[in-house]
Amino acid sequence: MAKRILVAAICAAAITSSAMANHLDPKNPSGTIVDRFADIEVLRYTVPGFNELPLDRKLFIYYLTEAALAGRDILWDQNGKYNLALRQIAEGIYRNYDGNRDDKNFKAFETYLKQIEFGNGAYHHYSTDKFTPGFTQNWFEGQLINLMKKNPEVAKNISPDEGRMVMRLIFDPAFMPKRVNQAEGADLILTSANNLYEGVTQKEVEEYFNAKKDPNDKTPISYGLNTKVVKENGKVKELPYKIGGLYSAAIERIVENLNKALPYAETEKQRNSIIELIKYYTTGDLRTFDTYSILWTEDTTPVVDFINGFIESYGDPLGMTGAWESIVNFKNAKASERTETISNAAQWFEDRSPVDPRFRKPEVKGVSAKVINAAILAGDAYPSTPIGINLPNANWIRASHGSKSVTIENITQAYDDASHGNGFNEEFVIDQPTRDLLDKYLFITDNLHTDLHECLGHGSGQLLPGVDPDALKAHGSTLEETRADLFALYYLADPHLLELGLLDNPDAYKAEYYKYMLNGLMTQLMRIEPGKDVEEAHMRNRKLIAEWALEHGKKDNVVELVTKNGKTYVKINDYRRLRELFGKLLAEIQRIKSEGDYAAGAKLVEQYAVKVDPKLHREVLDRYAKLSIAPYKGFVNPVYTPVLDDKGRIIDIDVTYEEDYLPQMFRYSDNYSPLTRK
């Protein structure tokens, strides 16, 4: 089950385009806008503290970042069968274009190229809908012919059949229209355009894995995590991602750099975990992955840490196959004091959770949490990235060995730096006292919500004996994120946070409560196209919680939508009662997960998390349009360059922040594309 938290719409809001010129500060580039196109804004983030690290840790980070970037092609291919060919053609056309760059077709093509670079393929990173070209097919065909003449290598590398399929992918709206389909009643495999399955139906896949699972196995592997499921000679089989298997060339590059990083591991357990990760990449054995995960989870002392592998399953409509991703990071010692305080109190929170005692963990093991600074983002964490992560995902490992949680504070800081002065609060927040509350307490309560979500929320509760971890099927990710958010919301208002010194005002939690309800009921709708349902797991999670609380609080007028001067606002009348509602819903979601009650979970999702009020949706879109706020944000990475002495030895690693968006994408394609024919 995927466990990560994405930045909410209100926190992702960035400054208006009119203020961009005043926000470019080369001395403090955090939050600086690099590019703006379609519904996307690209920002910079900085890596505070990197220059102060000793050389060994800088070298460790450097080789881990090289391992991270080496896997880029994997995600592109997982996201769609023709994505790598699409990227090679589109980048080739752009880089070889010698016509009028003010031509409307070229300008539209430039936007399309930036979109596919951001989405790691032909599909929107959040909605998973296929991008719509604003240029004509005739123009594109002409540019493709010119490219083939100018660059015969492209013609050699892209077969005529691939070229035809890329053309169809771009211009045929009915061909492979959606990367991940979650529509109730559809065959989610046949109607999803990702490249995780081929020639099989949802029924066949579910029957295949059900036959492999042993209901008495208390330590099950993560079935399907690192394989493509296909049908050969009438039989369903898995093709593993490993050296000698699928994605071998990229995985060899990853392993090469992991081996270079190995001498700089900070602890013996960290060294052993990297060795096991290399074994896993070599064999594809998921038992080895479990061994690696246990070692990684239990090793909480290193300053430098990383994730690298097939991890989160949002890109699989069945929630099984992991998308490739990597984040390299190091500890923010000062900020980690709050997460360490939370993790040390994990048993206190678990014992007082408002869920049935049968579903609580009698003993919380190995919960660790820290605040980190990301050094590099890659794969499914780039350019759009989570702001918090809790791993490993295997329930039995979490129960027996614990989990590690991180809040990525240099990313949340960049979002916050970018959001000042955007007019969002004035447009959507109901009154000045509430705006003042958000200004004063939202940054800390938002970070605390992430800490509680990742450290305690995902780590809380237990399955009853014999319950299949995949019992909630396609709704598993949504319900898991709902559970973690509710746990965090419930405890954010607990007086114990004041006793622990994490907050200094008993009303501070109200800032996060207001933001959460506003986002779930209204403002996240800016990310939905008119007439469409909510499909992304985190958006469904927030909508489910907010809509459920709105409906179940009507009798006591806990929260309501009110109209002022023709505009709709969220009004919370009883924050304490709202907390009680969060606790009640948490109890039910935990019951659903612990018992594997698919029917009840599906009913909640379909009733509260999917459908959109078209009138309210139109209003939100119109009000947002006046602000010129991009609904989605992402980042360019810093650039790390070895500094050599006169004998060619690395004496330092230099980090810079000047690289722009498309130049970074082109450099990655030139230097980190082992799966692309050249």
Image: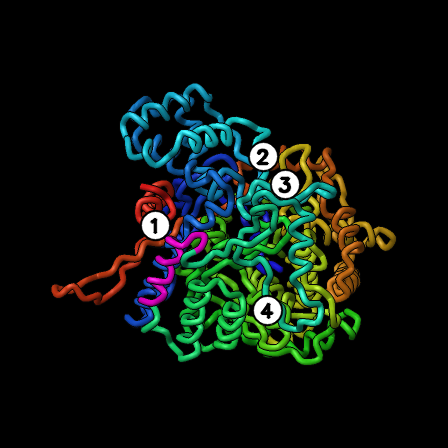
Nearer to us in this view, 676 or 13: 676
Q: Which residues are magenta?
A: 245-260
Q: CA distance from mark 1 to mark 3?
A: 31 Å
- Crowding at dot 4, Cα within 10 Å, few <14 / some 14-19 / many 20+, comes out as many
Q: Amino acid at mark 1?
A: Tyr
Can you tell which of label 3 and label 2 is closer to the viewer? 3
Amino acid type shown at disc 2: Pro
Marks 4 & 3, CB-CB < 8 Å contact: no
210 left or right of 132 in image: right
Q: Tell me the distance, in whole angstroms, between the alpha carbons under discs 4 and 1.
A: 33 Å
First reached walking from the N terminus: tag 3 or tag 2: 2
User: Spatial distance from mark 3 to mark 2, Cα to Cα?
Assistant: 11 Å
Residue 85 is drawn in which quadrant?
Answer: top left
Q: Amino acid at mark 4?
A: Cys
* Residue bearing the label numbered 2: 177
Q: Position of residue 553 (x, y in %)?
A: 82, 54
Q: Which residue lies under the disc numbered 4?
A: 455
Give the label on residue 190, or none. 3
Secondary structure type for disc 2? loop
Q: Residue 526: where, in percent of width, then height?
A: 61, 39
Question: Can residue 519 be seen in this snapshot?
Answer: no
Residue 546 in picture, x, y percent from top left = 73, 51
Say whether marks 3 and 2 touch (CB < 8 Å): no
Report the front residue among 26 and 470. 470
Q: Secondary structure at mark 3?
A: loop
Extreme-top residue of the structure: 138
Q: Residue at x 46, y 40 (%)?
A: 83
Mark 2 vs mark 4, CA separation in Å: 37 Å
Q: Which residue is mark 1?
A: 672
